[in-house]
Amino acid sequence: MSIPLVLADPTTAEKGALMALGFDYYLHGRQTADVVARILKGEKPGDIPVEFANKLFLLFNTKVAKDLDLDLTKMKESLDQFVENMKSQKVEVTLKLIQ
């Protein structure tokens, strides 16, 4: 019996997970650096609003989906709808299909 894995680290889809949704650690570090720069310029940390990653990556492993006998057309439609829904929350999601 195969169990599909859906994880939070985008690199795991390339290692055999069905799909993964997460952020780019490099971009997250740059976003964090901007906040640190504000603090170093004298801004009080308590005055800086909390920021969340606003650019996510959704990787979908088509080989694993085929191995699990999933309907790729329906899965792609659902993933596209998810990406569109996230736009309303001002979150950019990049969908990447991998094999």
Image (cartoon, rainbow, N blue to C red):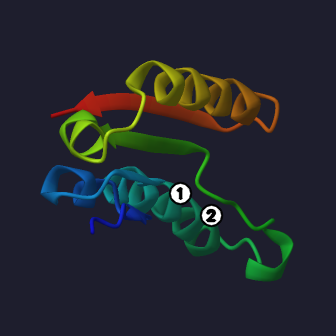
Badge 2, how many Cα within 10 Å: few under 14, some, many 20+?
Answer: few
Look at mark 1 in the image and give the residue it sits on: 34
Residue in view at x 53 percent, y 24 percent: 74
Describe the element under mark 2 as helix, strand or loop.
Answer: helix
Look at mark 2 in the image and give the residue it sits on: 38
Marks 2 and 1: in contact by CB < 8 Å? yes
| Image-based side of 16 in relation to 72, left or right | left
| Image-based side of 3 in relation to 50, left or right | left
Occupied quadrant, residue 44:
bottom right
Viewer-closest of 61 and 26: 61
CA distance for labels 1 and 2? 6 Å
Eyeballing the image, is 84 above or below 58?
above
Expressed as whole percent of the image width and height from the top left, the position of residue 90 reads 75, 35
| Image-based side of 86 in relation to 35, left or right | right
Occupied quadrant, residue 69:
top left
Residue in view at x 45 percent, y 58 percent: 28
